[in-house]
Each structure stands twice: as C-alpha cells, then as structure tokens.
C-alpha cells in the first residue's frame, strides 16, 4: 500500500519556506537548524544507545527522517529504508547502471561493467610499465628489445582503447577514497525519496521501496568524486553535476539545464516573492520552476554549500561574502553585496550555520570561527582540541546547542557565543556525515552502521 507521510516543519526545523512545502533533504531544510529538539549530550554512553544497525557498506550521506522511517545510502549506489524506532532494515535497493536498465538488458550491462573495469585496470598496468621503458629507451637509444617492448605496449593500449568505446557508457566516473559514490544525501517530499549517486544515476522511490523512475542525469567529471546533494524547490528536483539540472520529480525528465561547473557543495533553496529559487555553490541564483538565471558569479565555494537566512545568502570559506537577495525573481534586480570577510585560511568541508545574528563555521583542521552576520567581522577563531582528524560534518544547531564533529567520530557540543563553552564531548565510530536530530534523539550515519542515540 502506497503511503504519504506529512512532515511537520516545526519538528524538523523547516522555518522559512526555503524548500517546497513538506520537504526534507541535506541538513534538514539546508540550514542545519533543529531548534525544537532536546539534544542528547553524551553519544558514547551505553545507556544512551537506542539501537545500532550495521550497514552493508559505508557512506558519507546523512540520513533523512520521514515519519517512522529513516532513509540512507550505502556504497556505491544503494538506498536503504530503516524503521526509525527499531533500526530494522525494511528494504534496500542498489541502483547501478544494470539495476536501472530494462530487465532484459541487465545481464549484458553487468558484463559490460565488468569488461570496462578490466580494460581500465589493464590500461593502468600498461601505462605504469611504459614510463620506465621510455626512460630506458632514452638511456639506450639503439636497444631493439626495449623498442619492441614499447611498440607492443602502445599497440595493446591502442587495441584496448578501441575495445573500451563499446563499453565506455558503463564505466564509473573517477572518485576519491574518502568521497566514494554515495556522498549525496537523499531528498523527500514526504511520499517519494529522491537519491543521486556519483555514477550520475538519479532515482525516485515510494516509501515502500518501489522504484518510480531512474536515469543517468549526467556523469560527474571531477576526479575527486561528487557530493552535491539534490534539493527540491518549487516543484523541481534540482541536481548540480557539471551543469545544474531541473527535473520533474514525477517523471525524472529534465525541464531545464543551466551551464555551470562542478562543485562539491550542494545547492540551497530559498523563496523570493513567492517563487522558489536555488543558489549554487558556484554562485548562480536560478529560478527553480523554469531555470531562469537571475544572477551568476556571486562567489565560488570549492567544498561547502551556501547558507540562506531571512533573504541573505552567505558564502563562507577562505574568503566569504554575504548578499541580500533581490525582492523579485524576474531578473529585474540583482543581489546586493553586503560584506566580505576572511576567516582563517584553509579548506572548509563543513557548511556553516546561522544562529542569533552570527555565522558559525569550522575548517578542516578544527579551527572554529564566529562571524558577525551584520558586517562580516570575525568575532573569534579558536581550535577545538576535543575534535580529532579532519572535520567533514557540517555545523548544526540542536536545540540550544552548537554541534561539531570530525571524521574520527569525535563530537563536541557547545553553547552558542564567543565564549565557545564546551558542554559535552563524545567519541564513537568514525563518520563523515552530518548528524540529524529529532525530539530527544540524534541519528548518526557512521562508516559501518546507522546509530540512534537518546538523551
């Protein structure tokens, strides 16, 4: 039986109509704010563990909550549904190029997927052998044996390149070991779950696990992999790969495409004069319904996402900018630059948080900064020694507290403000995903499990 679950905006931190009504995705509504919860303070105490469910593979994607269910991803292209109360896996589906093909074609495509991996593996072997051969040829220019080996190597590579053309559509894009193919957090409108993977595959499922549609939207070309999560805005499923694509959520068909460039940070949604827009990490402001570009070149974020609060969009990284969004979404007005700022230079994998007039951000090396949202002044920067290893999870507001975490599994809960007072610290299994809060519980997607912790 097909079900539709109404998502309460108040309980999930949907405050300002940033997304289509009733939608949830990365960082909840994209802001990382869960103001109505009572955050668990101690995540590593046995008495606080409600359940822990091992997952088949790891993922950096955050979970999303829909009624009594949790949806999450696993490498390389799986979508899982769990019971939120018990952690039981209700269903899981992989979404490879073969999985989404017509049933009659699946075996042939699986064979081609294996073939292209074998070809690429052999090509790498040949290329690694060719370099020392060419070096030897320079040292011994008349060595016939070396020249023959070079010729044989290049001939085999040429043959393999021709063979690859027949199966290249089924080659997985390049990625990084820390990124993988499942770093994008799913999105939901309460009745459908939308997921995008680093293979270029987008899918939609109903809550019971029936695949509604699937397709390759665009294959990522960035060698370090893809992590920009999809967002629902004004009746469109917006996915940024190289370009920005506005899809019909009902069918998966492309309604519009805007030329852009690859970014790892997600698009975020906002509303201007009653019309949904998205702001990309590449600095485009796009009307969601029809793809009209209202502004471009605002700023370029390499790793994290923009942040929107009450009509102002913040781009915070090595350098930072704030723009007031135009009053109309018809292209007649441009965003107004309010300020520029310079928090400590480094990579900012974590996206920032707005709270009570301040922007909270943290770089990969655990330096935590607070910026005045009015003028961009950096109020304070300080290393958080309780965190260990690289900071990937984004800054989150859980009730009245700020939550920071790092990939080691270390987490720290602080009071807001420049005192940076630590309230509690925890250490658990490693994760790169951003925790999600609901009432008195936190849900954490670790590398090997889905974990529910209660206050």
Image (spheres, rainbow, N blue to C red):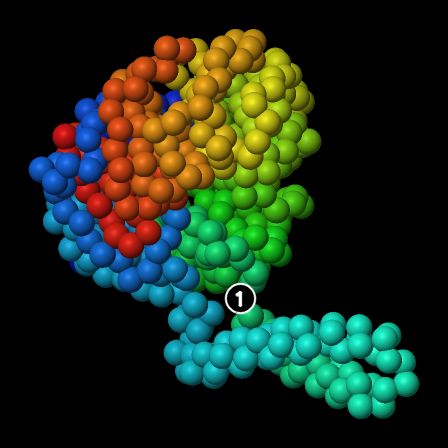
Foreground: 17 or 96? 96
Quarter of the image for residue 220 reads bottom right
Q: Is residue 98 left or right of residue 1?
A: right
Which residue is tagged 1? Answer: 172
Q: Residue furthest right?
A: 142
Looking at the rendered structure, the secondary structure element under dot 1 is loop
Quarter of the image for residue 279 reads top right
Q: Position of residue 371 (x, y in %)?
A: 50, 15
Q: Residue at x 19, y 53 (%)?
A: 53
Q: Position of residue 443 (x, y in %)?
A: 24, 40
Foreground: 80 or 188? 80
Quarter of the picture containing the N terminus is bottom left
Q: Is residue 298 left or right of residue 446?
A: right
Examine the rendered structure and indicate whether residue 121 appears above or below residue 197: below
Tell how many labels. Answer: 1
Crowd tier of the residue under label 1, counting other residues whose Cα lies within 10 Å: few below 14, some 14–19, many 20 or above: some
Q: Residue furthest front?
A: 139
Foreground: 443 or 6? 443
Q: Position of residue 140 (x, y in %)?
A: 86, 80
Q: Position of residue 135 (x, y in %)?
A: 80, 73
Q: Is residue 170 left or right of residue 163?
A: left
Q: Residue at x 41, y 33 (%)?
A: 394
Q: Residue at x 54, y 79 (%)?
A: 118
Quarter of the picture containing the C terminus is top left
Q: Mark yes or no: residue 166 visible.
A: yes
Q: Residue at x 47, y 25 (%)?
A: 367
Examine the rendered structure and indicate whether residue 128 appears above or below residue 27: below
Quarter of the image for residue 77 reads bottom left
Examine the rendered structure and indicate whether residue 233 appears above or below residue 177: above
Q: Mark yes or no: residue 433 visible.
A: no
């Amino acid at each position: 039986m097909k079900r539709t679950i109404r998502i309460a905006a108040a309980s999930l931190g949907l405050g300002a109509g940033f997304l289509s009504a009733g939608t949830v995705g990365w960082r909840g509504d994209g802001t990382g704010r869960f103001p109505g919860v009572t955050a668990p303070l101690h995540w590593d105490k046995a008495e606080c563990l409600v359940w822990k469910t091992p997952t088949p593979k790891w993922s950096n994607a955050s979970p999303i909550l829909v009624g009594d269910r949790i949806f999450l991803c696993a490498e390389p292209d799986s979508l899982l549904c769990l019971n939120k109360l018990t952690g039981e896996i209700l269903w899981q589906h992989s979404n490879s190029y073969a999985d989404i093909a017509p049933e009659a074609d699946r075996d042939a495509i699986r064979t081609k997927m294996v073939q292209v991996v074998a070809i690429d593996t052999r090509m790498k072997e040949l290329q690694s052998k060719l370099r020392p051969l060419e070096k030897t040829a320079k040292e011994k220019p008349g060595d016939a044996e070396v020249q023959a080996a070079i010729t044989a190597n290049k001939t085999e590579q040429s043959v393999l390149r021709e063979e690859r053309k027949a199966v290249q559509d089924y080659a997985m894009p390049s990625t990084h070991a820390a990124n993988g193919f499942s770093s994008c957090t799913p999105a939901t409108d309460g009745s459908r779950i939308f997921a995008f993977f680093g293979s270029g595959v987008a899918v939609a499922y109903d809550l019971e696990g029936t695949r509604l549609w699937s397709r390759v939207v665009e294959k990522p070309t960035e060698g370090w992999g893809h992590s920009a999560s999809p967002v629902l805005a004004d009746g469109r499923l917006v996915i940024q790969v190289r370009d920005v694509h506005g899809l019909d959520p009902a069918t998966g068909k492309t309604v519009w495409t805007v030329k852009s460039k690859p970014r790892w940070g997600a698009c975020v949604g906002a509303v201007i004069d009653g019309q949904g827009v998205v702001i990309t990490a590449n600095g485009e402001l796009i009307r969601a319904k029809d793809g009209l570009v209202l502004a471009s070149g605002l700023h370029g974020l390499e790793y994290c996402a923009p942040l929107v609060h009450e009509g102002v969009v913040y781009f915070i990284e090595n350098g930072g900018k704030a723009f007031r969004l135009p009053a109309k979404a018809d292209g007649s007005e441009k965003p107004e630059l309010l300020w520029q700022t310079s928090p400590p230079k480094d990579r900012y994998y974590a996206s920032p948080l707005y709270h009570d007039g301040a922007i909270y951000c943290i770089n990969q090396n655990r330096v935590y900064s607070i910026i005045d949202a009015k003028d961009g002044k950096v109020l304070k920067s300080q290393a958080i020694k309780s965190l260990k290893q690289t900071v990937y999870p984004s800054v989150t507001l859980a009730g009245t507290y700020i939550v920071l975490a790092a990939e080691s599994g270390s987490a720290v809960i602080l009071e807001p403000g420049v005192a940076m007072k630590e309230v509690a610290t925890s250490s658990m299994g490693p994760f790169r995903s951003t925790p999600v809060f609901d009432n008195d519980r936190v849900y954490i997607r670790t590398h090997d499990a889905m974990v529910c912790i209660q206050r």
